[in-house]
Amino acid sequence: EPEVTQTPSHQVTQMGQEVILRCVPISNHLYFYWYRQILGQKVEFLVSFYNNEISEKSEIFDDQFSVERPDGSNFTLKIRSTKLEDSAMYFCASSEAQPRAESGANVLTFGAGSRLTVL
Amino acid sequence: QKEVEQNSGPLSVPEGAIASLNCTYSDRGSQSFFWYRQYSGKSPELIMFIYSNGDKEDGRFTAQLNKASQYVSLLIRDSQPSDSATYLCAVKGNTGFQKLVFGTGTRLLVSP
């Protein structure tokens, strides 16, 4: 079964360092997302990406965050200068169809996540 | 503020019983509703989605949607210990590239 692949599975970094989290979405999917989940809290939307541009972002996704699709397969999330409060599990997700489609193609498939620990 | 609310639990049921998980949402324009299961330290895994009022069944799972009451529920029949997890309700609006808004999840414990 196709899956979303994320690397690294766990990254420990010092406050102020740059971090890049990588994702390989499912190959025929066109819509890509990053969500995060702080330990013990809800899953929160960060950003959605379609056609090589950001389609929507949350208030969490400030200037310290950026996303990129550098080639035909990878989708990356960069945090420029990490803060303690950036410690969380970061989930990449992808979907086949545009979000309004009332079909299974609308469904997000999540990767296993990248746990980021900022010290 | 668009919100999705769930009772955090834990909801404890014996093996073989029916577990009933509930979710309410505040955005009346929401059109798509999803139930995800999340084991501790793992990613959300889709169980079911529902778009229309009424019931939708898939194996041991039944999703129920009442848009007038802004209420969606998940029933798990013949609950198994392996169903013990946190169940996340997620809601998506119907305009543009609306984000998926998650509830905090309900922790389900199924005892043997």
Image: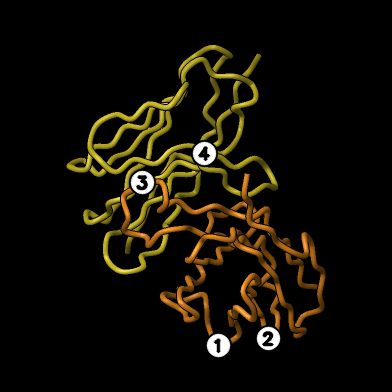
Chain colours: A orange, B yellow
Three-letter amino acid code at the position of disc 3:
Phe
Between the C-alphas of marks 3 and 2, the distance is 34 Å
Three-letter amino acid code at the position of disc 4:
Tyr
Q: Mark 2 points at which residue?
A: A80
Report how many numbered discs are placed on residues in the image: 4
Residues flagged by tags 3 and 1 on a common chain: no
Q: Pinpoint the chain carrying mark 4.
A: B
Neighbor class of circle 1 (other Cα within 10 Å; few <14, some 14-19, many 20+) is: few
Q: Pinpoint the chain carrying mark 2.
A: A
* Mark 1: secondary structure: loop
Between the C-alphas of marks 3 and 1, the distance is 31 Å
Three-letter amino acid code at the position of disc 2:
Arg
Q: Name the residue under label 4.
A: B87
The earlier-in-sequence mark between 1 and 2 is 1
Q: Name the residue under label 3.
A: B33
Between the C-alphas of marks 1 and 2, the distance is 8 Å
Q: Which residue is drawn at 69% across and 58% down?
A: A5
